């Protein structure tokens, strides 16, 4: 079955859903394709299950980039206060934990529901449990799955990184970028305090430590 849209979004995480309903509000016909059985799986585990959804003091100086000016325009066009207004619109109660970190009083499920509701009200279609078999491009992008073929002049890749394989993270987005000739920088851990060389990593791995305790 072939289906035509104005934009196809791959990935129903925070970025994908935000992008989808923003485009939907502008009158675009949007479909979101998600390989997992539900949306927002990473959101649900963020902040210990309470979703640390923004920071009051988010500024360009908090970001590293090859282009240090990129984040300036991004943060100027959509501020933490803009997202807080969305949270308040959906009557989600929240609190500041420390250093401007904002968390839901209740559950991260509230944020996922909020994003789904915004997509629904903007006419966005969300398809879960779908595996992308192939992405090609002629005059449009063509995304083929087991059951359907989706076509659109615009394709958004919001499939996330490799940080949490247990919830389904894969290298799909990087592979797709390379397929279309985009340069991909070498990936490395970004939110851990320590890195080890190969010999130290082996010596201090959990399995090695457990065996020493058992001995």
Image: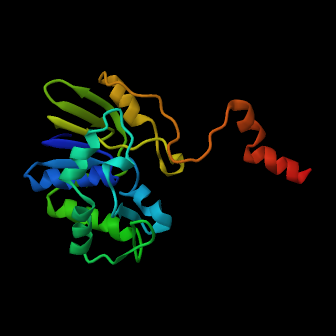
Q: Quadrant of the N terminus?
A: top left
In this view, the residue in front, 116 or 133, is 116
Residue 131 as seen in the image, left or right of residue 205 = left
Task: Report the residue at 20% width, 31% height from top.
Answer: 141
* Residue 149 visible in the snapshot: no
- Tell me: residue 11, above or below residue 176: below
In this view, the residue in front, 144 or 180, is 180
Q: Residue 184 occupies which quadrant of the picture?
A: top left
Task: Report the residue at 39% width, 41% height from top.
Answer: 64
- Residue farthest toward the right in the current orientation of the protein: 215
In this view, the residue in front, 164 or 139, is 164
Task: Report the residue at 31% width, 67% height from top.
Answer: 113
User: Measured from the top left, where is residue 10 in percent x and y?
Assistant: 30, 43
Q: How is the image coloured?
A: rainbow
- Tell me: residue 201, above or below residue 191: above
User: Measured from the top left, where is residue 175 in percent x and y?
Assistant: 39, 29
Looking at the rendered structure, the number of numbered marks drawn on it comes to 0
In this view, the residue in front, 197 or 44, is 197
User: Measured from the top left, where is residue 137 in percent x and y?
Assistant: 21, 26
- Residue farthest toward the front in the current orientation of the protein: 61
- Residue farthest toward the top in the current orientation of the protein: 181
- Tell me: residue 119, above or below residue 203: below
* Residue 96 visible in the snapshot: yes
Residue 74 as seen in the image, left or right of residue 97 = left
User: Measured from the top left, where is residue 26 in percent x and y?
Assistant: 8, 52
Task: Report the residue at 33% width, 39% height from top.
Answer: 146
């Amino acid at each position: 079955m072939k289906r035509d849209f104005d934009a196809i979004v791959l990935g129903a995480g925070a970025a994908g859903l935000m992008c989808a309903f923003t485009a939907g509000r502008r009158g675009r016909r949007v479909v979101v394709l998600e390989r997992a059985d539900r949306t927002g799986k990473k959101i649900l585990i963020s902040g210990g299950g309470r979703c640390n959804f923004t920071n009051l003091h988010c500024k360009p100086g908090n970001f590293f980039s090859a282009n240090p000016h990129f984040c300036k325009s991004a943060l100027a066009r959509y501020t933490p206060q803009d997202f807080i207004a969305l949270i308040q619109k959906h009557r989600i109660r929240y609190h500041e934990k420390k250093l401007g970190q904002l968390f839901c009083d209740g559950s991260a499920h509230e944020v996922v529901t909020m994003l789904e509701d915004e997509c629904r009200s903007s006419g966005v279609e969300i398809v879960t449990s779908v595996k992308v078999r192939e992405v090609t491009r002629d005059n449009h992008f063509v995304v083929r799955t087991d059951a359907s073929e989706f076509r659109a002049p615009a394709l958004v890749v919001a499939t996330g990184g490799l940080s949490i394989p247990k919830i389904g993270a894969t290298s799909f987005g990087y592979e797709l970028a390379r397929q279309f000739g985009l340069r991909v920088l070498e990936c490395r851990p970004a939110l851990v305090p320590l890195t080890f060389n190969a010999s130290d990593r082996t010596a201090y791995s959990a399995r090695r430590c457990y065996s020493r305790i058992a001995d």
